[in-house]
């Protein structure tokens, strides 16, 4: 069983992700705002993190920088979900260290498959 | 004769009158991901309903205050949540409002709350029909 940390303020998104991740056999931890994410990650040691780009308190991009600058969190694969389909945003996120960027709406099945790939690599 | 709200959406945000209310592809995808479990889909829709209602009130308040930054924040939330729930027209309307705010050309503080409410309410009616 792997632990996935979800940081997203949209309860619909959280519900969808939680349902599908638990069904795939993962343990899920949730933050509804950005300020508590690093502390939560240090506490639960996730195997993978999913950030909303427009998270209140601290954005998905800022969180990537936080994780990559922290010796204990730097290796955790990060998926970012965003409502902005702009190529420049995607490029910026990938450059900062995101493993994958998904633009909303997206297929939960495709996301779960990508998570499985990242966890097994 | 087109609904006056739809005419306003076209005039103010170039939203095509024929754009579907629901994103059938997204709804099918959700049902598939939920193993066609209508009970879970109902939970998703109910979650959207309960979370979007306070956001609509916020949109009303921020539009009245002509606060573009806070209005955008509430609109962005509805746009993303609606897209995830398969409420295409509502999501697209909100995206276009966001774009106008980002580009500094947004002036429709007056009509926006009623337009978002209009699309929100009819999207929920349509999605309820799908779940019935």
Image (cartoon, coloured by chain):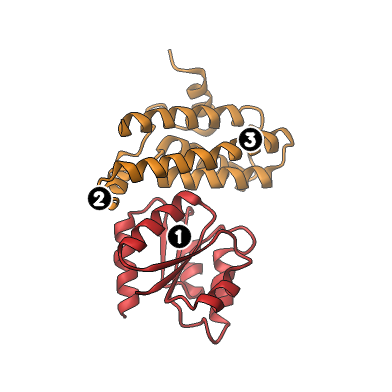
Chain colours: A red, B orange
Indicate left or right for B125 with B95 as reference: left
Specify the farthest residue to the right. B65
CA gap, disc 1 and disc 3: 26 Å
| C-alpha gap between disc 2 and disc 1 | 23 Å
Measured from the top left, where is residue B117 in percent x and y?
54, 29
Q: In this view of the protein, which residue sits in the foreground, B31 or B59?
A: B31
Q: Residue at x 36, y 35 (%)?
A: B22
The x, y position of residue A35, in whole percent, is 63, 66
Q: Position of residue A60 (x, y in %)?
A: 54, 65
Chain letter of mark 2 equals B
Which of the 4 image quarters holds residue A27? Answer: bottom left
| Residue at the disc numbered 1 | A81
Residue B35 - label: 2
Q: Which residue is mark 3?
A: B57
Q: Is residue B93 left or right of residue B129?
A: right
Q: Nearer the N terminus, badge 3 or badge 2?
A: 2
Task: Give the class, few, some or many, for how many residues have Cα within 10 Å of label 3's Cα (few <14, many ≥20).
Answer: some
């Amino acid at each position: 069983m792997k632990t996935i940390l979800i940081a997203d303020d949209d309860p619909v998104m959280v519900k969808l992700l939680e349902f599908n991740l638990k069904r795939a056999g993962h343990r899920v931890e949730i933050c509804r705002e950005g300020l508590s994410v690093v502390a939560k990650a240090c506490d639960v040691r996730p195997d993978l993190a999913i950030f909303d780009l427009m998270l209140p308190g601290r954005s998905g991009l800022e969180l990537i920088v936080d994780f990559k600058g922290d010796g204990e969190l730097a290796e955790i694969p990060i998926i970012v979900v965003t409502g902005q389909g702009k190529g420049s945003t995607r490029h910026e996120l990938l450059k900062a260290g995101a493993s994958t960027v998904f633009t909303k709406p997206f297929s939960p099945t495709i996301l779960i498959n990508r998570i499985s790939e990242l966890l097994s690599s | 004769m087109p609904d006056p709200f739809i005419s306003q959406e076209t005039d103010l945000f170039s939203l095509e009158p024929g754009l579907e209310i629901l994103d059938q592809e997204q709804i099918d995808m959700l049902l598939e991901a939920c193993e066609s479990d209508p009970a879970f889909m109902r939970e998703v829709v109910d979650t959207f309903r309960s979370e979007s209602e306070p956001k609509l009130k916020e949109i009303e308040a921020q539009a009245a205050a002509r606060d573009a930054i806070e209005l955008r924040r509430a609109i962005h939330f509805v746009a993303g949540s609606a897209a995830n729930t398969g409420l295409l027209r509502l999501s697209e309307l909100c995206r276009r409002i966001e774009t106008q705010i980002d580009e500094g050309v947004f002036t429709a503080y007056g009509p926006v709350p009623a337009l978002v409410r209009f699309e929100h309410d009819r999207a929920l009616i349509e999605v309820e029909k799908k779940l019935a």
